Amino acid sequence: MRQFRSLPVLAIRRMLGNWRLLISVVAGTLIAGAILASTVVYADAIRDLGLDHALEQESVHDLDLRLTQTNIAIRAQLFAESQQRIDAAVRDALRGTGGAIVRQGTSATFYSSPPGGRPDLDDSARPRANFRFRSNLLDHTTLSAGRLPQPDPAPDGAIEVMLGAATARTHGLALGDRLDLHPFWDEEIQPLRVEIVGLIEPNDLTDRYWNGQADLLDSQTPNWPTYLLFVSEQAFFGEPARAIPSTTARYRVVYQVDRDRLDSRVAGAVAAGVKNLEARLAATEHPLRVETKLDRVLETFDEKLFFVRIPLFVLLLQIGGVVAYYLLVVSTMLIERQAEEIATLRSRGATTPQLLAQYGIEAVILAALAVGVGPPLAAFVIAALGPTPAFADLSGGAPLEVHLSGLAFALAGAGALLAFLAFMVPAWQATRRTVIGFKQSAARPRREPLFLRYYLDVALVLVLAIVFWRLRREEDLFEEPLFGEPQADPFLLTTPAVAMLTAGIVFLRLFPLVLRLAAWLVARGRGVALLVGTRALARNPTHYSRLILMLMLATGVGMFGATFSATLDRSYDDRSAYAAGADARGTDLRGLYRQGDPAFLEAIEAIPAQRASPLIRGGASVSANGDIARIELLAVEPGSFGEVAWFRSDFADRSLDSMLEELEGNATAVSYVPLPEDTRQFGVWAKLPDIRAAMDLIAVFRDARGVLFRGWLGVVRPSDVATEEWRFFSIDLQQLRTRSGRIISLELEPPIVALWEEGATPHPTGREPGGGPPGGIKK
């Protein structure tokens, strides 16, 4: 046992005695651990940097989780139990990245009137009012006048409330004013009486507490006054629900996300949890809606991250191979320097296990250095990249934030294992020779390596040929399975590493032949020194071939990194162009359809581009044999689309120009039916004898300004009379209404034209055609 305890001491003394020889091995071991660990540390740093950048592009309010429940009975216990279940589910989804929680409850609408009065139900601008509570309201508002309301009603039954100071100024309300609140859903219920006892103003509407909404304290409804009457949560669940048990509420809870705690290591789990949150809560919290952009941002980031992992994995394979070869070279050179000493010890009775134990302890010490020092060294170097020009814009000139994960130490351990094997394999070979064997090997040329003797290099060439054949045969490097995420073919990803390894091994076979040829040519001359040198190289080229091969591999990795960066830049450009479709894309133009052609043209001209092409993207469905298939439609202008659209040859079997020429040759003209300038109503005669479900009758109108309006004429159900005989459906063009009956504040400017949808034939009102309707729909 004492012998084993003394082995580490002897190993350390031996290493200190041979420090000049060991320094290259120690450096190589540390570099191996640092380089392999740096791939993980660098990937994590880039992931965190990319995630921070992606999150900064979105408003913090859009990243917060907004959970809304509507038409819920006002019950304190019911609300508390529901919030406990929701809180637990949200905490689980956010994985510790949640921040503050803001809860808000808003009652159903009441019509407001002076005390003892009644609301004018014929007046669409009659005042409305809602009770509202909001958590921590007093911490973010200032009581500008009055006092805080009491949770219990006044002796005469009046409910004390606070009102936004801006609302009071706008609508002439003051402290002490009383209002009667009549529930909109039942005119016979006795109204609630409220008294304004306090006026409040927001401290800072830009504070995250207000969720980017300026109307949470003072409502800004355009068509009628709305009074938001603030009470405490206790009062909200008190008198209103007791006096009118049928009162319902709309609850909205905002769960803020702490971006500082959201890193790339939990991004995938958070995205999945948030995406499934609504479905998870649907069983117990119905109805509930979850609104956030967090899951979309994280999923987009994860998709981009997938394409970042691939080049890192490819480079890891090559760098790992070069580092392993370097360690093997320096360890072999070290053992060769000690070969005579090893042979002497072997001849004096030392056994192979004893010698291997000594070298094994030295290798373990080196491996421990690689594991312990490699990851911190990699983290220090990568953090120092922050102020460099490549990262300064994203990091703000500060050092990069690095994270030492278990995987970083595991890869450092892999580097340590490479160092251990690279040290022990030559030592094992050296301990098998005695002094006689050492002298014999020193007097004769070295034998060819095993892989050259058995032509394994030829087998590698065949493997490389198969890899290149697969690479040319496969159209895509990535595969998208029916279920799951896209996957890269690892066989194809190893192509650069296999190519470099094959080139290196072929070099080892050809290099001695080239040296022999060079020595033969030099022998034809008269230079003795050159002849001796070339013959010495040709006789024992091992030492030189090792160094040349290592330089070749290192140069190959450097060239691959330089050229692959250009490939990545091209990939990023192509993916950006694919997402945009052109150099620039104008979006959110759909809302201009009611403003006419001038507004649309003005928006198009505001885009900084030399050429433009309009297009419309929509969806449709095709049904056959009971199956429904969803399709996407893209309506383009063939004459200008080809000038601005980004297209790549592998998108289709045909060129873009040929497809646009075919579309232009089959263009369809849109025909409009002009209406007389004094037309007040528009209608059609319709008969639908064979329908399986309700069908809406809709007409599209376009006025002189280009404003479009979809007018709802009516609905026909399978049991209606219109399925058996002709019926007339009409719409008032001077009082446009939607299907719900809501009046549209839009005046069509003559002349007006009509376009009928669903293949129907329009017919202006004013006369009833004889002998039956001239136009109708049959389906």
Image: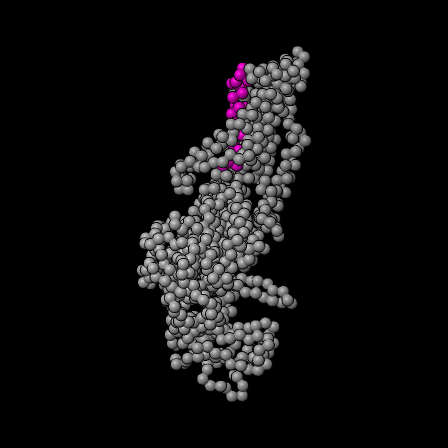
Depth check, front residue: 586 or 260: 260
Residue 477, relative to residue 31: is it above or below? below
| 711 sits left or right of 450 in the view | left
Q: Residue most toward the top?
A: 348
Q: Quadrant of residue 468?
A: top right
Visible residue check, residue 647:
no
| 232 sits left or right of 460 in the view | left
| 694 sits left or right of 169 in the view | right
- Which quarter of the figure is the C terminus placed in? bottom right
Determine the residue positioned at 43% across, 63% down.
192
Q: Is residue 470 covered in magenta?
A: no
Q: Residue most toward the front?
A: 155
Q: Which residues are magenta?
A: 15-42
Determine the residue positioned at 59% across, 23% down.
363
Count all numbered tags in the image, as a single digit. Answer: 0
- Which quarter of the figure is the N terminus placed in? top right
Depth check, front residue: 263 or 527: 263
Depth check, front residue: 242 or 317: 242
Determine the residue positioned at 47% across, 52% down.
253
Q: Position of residue 424 (x, y in %)?
A: 62, 24
Q: Position of residue 693 (x, y in %)?
A: 59, 72
Q: Is residue 25 covered in magenta?
A: yes
Residue 379, relative to residue 759: is it above or below? above
Q: Quadrant of residue 524?
A: top right
Visible residue check, residue 185:
yes
Q: Main secondary structure of the magenta part?
A: helix
Tell me the colour scheme of the image: one colour
Determine the residue positioned at 44% across, 45% down.
53
